[in-house]
Amino acid sequence: MKIRTIRYILLSVISILVLYSALGFGKRSFEAYCPFGGMESIWGLFKSGEFSCALGPLNLSMLIAVLILTVIAKKSFCGWICPIGFLSELGGRLGSKIWPKRPEIGAKLNGILKLLRYPALIAALYFTYRTGELILRGYDPFYIIFSGFGHGTLGLISYIVLGLLVIGSLVIPMFFCRYLCPLGAVFDPFSRLGLIKLTRDADSCTGCGECDSACPHQLKPQRWKKIRHRDCTNCLECLEACPEKEVMDLKITI
Ligand code: SF4
Ligand code: SF4
């Protein structure tokens, strides 16, 4: 079975479970499983010793678990678990069918746009700390989708956010994950340490570029001997695309 098939089955099962919980069938609110809620709750715990809104200890546990996972296997949460990453990836694939020759964002602009994740993170933490409420819910696609535009969403603004996620993914692969996801910003330093990473044997590599074309995050794996890039999700698309079966490998390495 292809690695992508296994990954998509896993992502579909997780998305269905979150949806099941969002529809009220689970024991807890779907928000209880969001690791970013753990990040937001830290401030509330410092300030008042209480979790904000619907957040609880499970959010904190999820955050800690995902940070440990990131130190072990880079941003594999984003590529193997996150429903928003899944939606973005599907949008990117659809976009490449509609517009096969999409121009790529230049490396410099791409690097600058990636910095947007940090103000997004600071804003989310600051406003949660100040108000004790998750007042940025209306800007959070995970909440907007799974709550079905529930309370706290912002009408037109939330539709625009969702439109940006969908249209952005069609035009720029992984648009939300690359440029706006505050959880991605939290993961960045941990992902740089990630122990399990892909390696490329430069001596056997033919330079065919298939790995570069396959990477949903456009990380240019052909340039790396060890893929240390903080945004690598270990999705293994590049490994699967490589026609030389001995060139790329997944290893535990620093
Ligand atoms: S470099 Fe390879 S494993 Fe990392 S995100 Fe790109 S395709 Fe996935
Ligand atoms: S797909 Fe494999 S052989 Fe081709 S450039 Fe990438 S690592 Fe080298």
Image: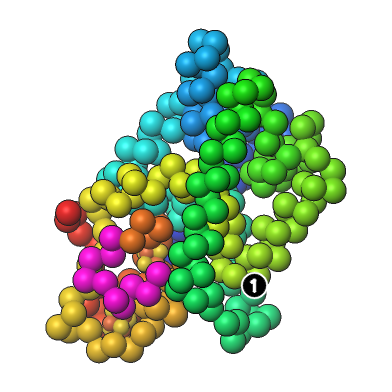
Q: Residue type at mark 1: give it.
A: Val
The correct choice, above or below, for 137 with respect to 88 in the image is above
Q: Residue furthest left?
A: 203
* Residue 224 counted in the magenta span: yes
Instruction: Name the residue rendered at 54%, 38% in the picture.
Output: 122
Instruction: Name the residue rendered at 22%, 77% in the picture.
Output: 247
In the image: residue 43, left or right of residue 243: right
Q: Residues within 10 Å of mark 1 (few under 14, many from 20)?
A: some
In the image: residue 163, left or right of residue 246: right
Which residue matches tag 1? Answer: 171
In the image: residue 121, left or right of residue 187: right
The C terminus is located in which quarter?
Answer: bottom left
Instruction: Name the residue rendered at 59%, 36% in the picture.
Output: 124
In the image: residue 195, left or right of residue 210: left
The chief SS type of the magenta part is: loop
Image-quadrant location for residue 168: bottom right
The correct choice, above or below, for 24 with respect to 143 in the image is above
Where ligand 2 lies, by quadrant? Answer: bottom left
Nearest the viewer among 19 and 202 is: 202
Instruction: Name the residue rendered at 47%, 48% in the picture.
Output: 184
x, y percent for residue 183: 50, 43
Whether residue 142 can be seen here = yes
Image-quadrant location for residue 201: bottom left
Q: Which residues are magenta?
A: 218-228
Q: Secondary structure at mark 1?
A: helix
x, y percent for residue 95: 64, 74
Quick check: is the Cβ at mark 1 less than 8 Å away from ligand 1? no
Whether residue 1 can be seen here = no
Nearest the viewer among 246 and 59 is: 59
Image-quadrant location for residue 244: bottom left
The correct choice, above or below, for 252 with respect to 213 in the image is above
x, y percent for residue 74: 34, 51
